[in-house]
Amino acid sequence: MVAARAALRLTGVRKTFSGVVALSDVTFEVRSGEVHALVGENGAGKSTLMAVAAGVYAADTGTVEICGTPLEPISPPRARELGLEVVYQHPAVLDDLTVVENLLLAVPSDRRPEGAPDDWARDLLKRIEADIDPRRRVDRLSVGQRQQLEIAKALAGEPRVLVLDEPTETLTRGEIERLFTHIERFRDAGTAVVYISHRLPDVLRISDRLTVLRDGRTRGTFATSGTSEDEIVNLIVGREVDAAFPAKATGLAADREPALSARRLSGERFHDVSLEVRPGEILGLAGVEGNGQREVIRALAGLEEATGQYWVNGRQVAPGSVRAAQRAGVRFIPGSRHAEGLLAGQSVRANVALLALPELARAGVVRASRERELVGREAERLGVKAASLEAPAETLSGGNQQKLMLARVLLSQPDVLLADEPTHGVDAGSRLEIYRILRRLADDGHGVVVLSSDAVELQGLCDRVLVFSRGTIAAELAGDRLTEAEITSAALRAGTEVQAGGTRRRRVVLRHLLGDDLAPSAVVLAAVVALAAYTAAHQGHFLSARNINNVLLLATGLAFVAMGQLIVMLLGGIDLSVGPLMGLLVVVGSFFFDTSAVGSQLLGAIVVLAVAAAVGLINAILVRRTKLVPIIATLATYTVLQGVSLALRPVPGGTIDESVISVLNAKVGAVPVAFVVALLLCLCLEAVLRRSQPGMTLRAVGSDEQAAHRIGLRVGPTVYLAYVSCSLLTALGALMLMAQVGIGDPTSGVENTLLSITAVVLGGASVFGGRGSFIGAFLGALLLEEITSASSFLNLSLAWQTWLPGVLILVAAGIYSRVRGARTVALAAD
């Protein structure tokens, strides 16, 4: 029998990060038509190896071949072109884009649909039995739906090699079974599948062969048939492993006061929940996802609103209050360490010491030596592996990050520990250590509550398990009844998930409406109309042709700059230099536009645009090449441009010729021609932003730059184009400013920096990037100029011209932050 050819071959791969060896001389081969499992502890190098295969990282040494062709040049687009697709553990999906936009960006241009993209997306999703609306924004998807989208993206690329990195961590058992069916179809069709997972039963179920990685080296490749879980675990950890679960508690005193008790606890997704946790006991919470168990443990931690009675060691605690729960000695380990658990950019020391700061401080000052001593001792006791206590938490493996959160709560000496999926995404070795830590905490007389979707884990670790259904406790299992089969049976027999109440549904609908990119535009337009009507009712001349013309002329210049500012803010950046750039361009123009000679005016226009493009390019280089934070980079440009303007024109001078002013101020009736041009440009840019590849790429990079890179988008060129485009649009605004000031004034445009940012935020753009609307920015500029004019007509002081935009921007930013924050918490809790 002839062996199947290698679809993916990595030979002699070595990869280091800042001198730390992640992979050392790794050789790995996957055949067409097989499922090849890649197993190992967190930090063993599995994901790094597949990142090398996918072109995300370039290996220091070694080669990568996909279907017999070397991966050259090394890049994600080239790997995808050769037929390799990756379903990442942390989905490379773009929250601020829709499902169909994510799918379109995930496939090469030659594989994109010619017809309706929504129908194409529905077909892809239907193939994996995912019931998701293609027009739905990704930030509104559940964790499981995001994983399904990641799988659909891989399918869209029609892979010859499919890499699945921890694909089942967020899926229900039914979804896992459907995924396995699809994997088997891929294998039967000749696709090579690389399956990375910590769930050894799944590995044994689905794979044909497996390769073990340990400490960045391959420890052997084996046929799955005939290999036991114990043998795999021993290979992974490099030693014989004792029994998976520590011994359970014996002889719990029923007469002792409960460590935690709740009576008739009710919230939005649960009701009339009563439970007790005795000292020394580990209580498990189980049930089909969505039946209220997650909301209950979060309510006990004070993270969900709740009513009812709640005690910790006999002391009554106000439910739904984080501060009250923590004062009572309750500590919580969230299910999503990335969204809620870790301060990713902070050190190991800072993360561990966080909850113990009151005990480590004297007169409000943290004792550094004591902090290092206690943190070091706790980290050593739990076996946290890090380069040093000052290493950023984000550099640790998943298992060590989880132990980091455990070290944090243990250092704060909790009376009750609440753990939501404490072994989520953790390798076999770390999982066993976490089990022992939790049992040791219980043996010391504390109460422990564990929520887990793994019935085997609940059976082996917990003394009792409460199974939830429809927001209430459906069964209590202990003793001989506490088995995997009983837990699963009780959860499935109890019913389907609880439905959110009407109030919650209304809140969700309202949140979605407020979160839509164009919804703020309607609000701003309503404000424009309302302000005009109110002012006209008190001063009829406000709507005179002359005043309308003046307001629209002023709004046009600001609108150009605001639309440029929006492009940069869609990236998650900011351009503080637009105001001084306008002043510089007015000064430059004053040397050319002081005559009616057409040649001089044409040259002036070219020079103005060239200077603007050069400034945009400099900003992009400072941000992209030197890695300066945008606010710092453009603040430096701000200062330099202001200085250059004053050097060219120490005092205002150089009159703009009347012929230039008349062209720029041309009007039809009361409406300036330039305003119509700006409006048409706004609509065109909005269409480009929503419908074109460049527009989707811009929003994708702003939504998540790392994810955009992983799916093969051109991040660097997008950044350069954004900053240059911002400066060119600022140049159009500067031309309008010339017509207004009529002279080369070096300070004339400075105020437009803050005004442009205000207009963009009023229009609903996210300061975090990825979301915004040119229509909103345009209307925001119009509203600001209308406020200035209305303040004058209503005889308001100059202070009100500053206060009103300030209040509006606070309200707009506050609403968006609340909406975004609510979505983040909901996603983390899902």
Image (cartoon, rainbow, N blue to C red):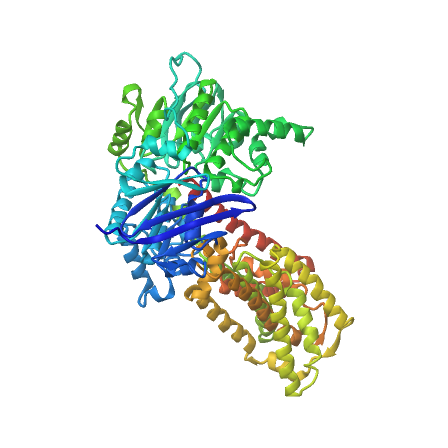
- Going by the image, does 363 lie left or right of 54? right
Residue at horizontal 57 percent and vertical 26 percent from the top: 377
Farthest residue toward the right?
650
- Going by the image, does 122 lie left or right of 15? left
Q: Can residue 205 be seen in this view?
A: yes
In this view, 89 is above or below 522: above
In this view, 211 is above or below 314: below
**Could you tell me residue 827's position as x and y percent?**
42, 44
- Return the residue nearer the eye: 397 or 582: 397
Q: In which quarter of the view is residue 786 placed?
A: bottom right
In this view, 28 is above or below 724: above
**Could you tell me residue 151's position as x and y percent?**
34, 51
Q: Can residue 454 be seen in this view?
A: no
Farthest residue toward the left?
1
- Return the residue nearer the eye: 152 or 187: 187
Farthest residue toward the front?
1
Count of numbered badges drawn on the protein = 0
Residue at horizontal 49 percent and vertical 45 percent from the top: 821
Quarter of the picture holding the C terminus: top left
- Return the residue nearer the eye: 783 or 402: 402
In this view, 187 is above or below 263: below
- Return the residue nearer the eye: 689 or 407: 407
**Could you tell me residue 441's position as x and y percent?**
47, 22
**Could you tell me residue 747's position as x and y percent?**
72, 67
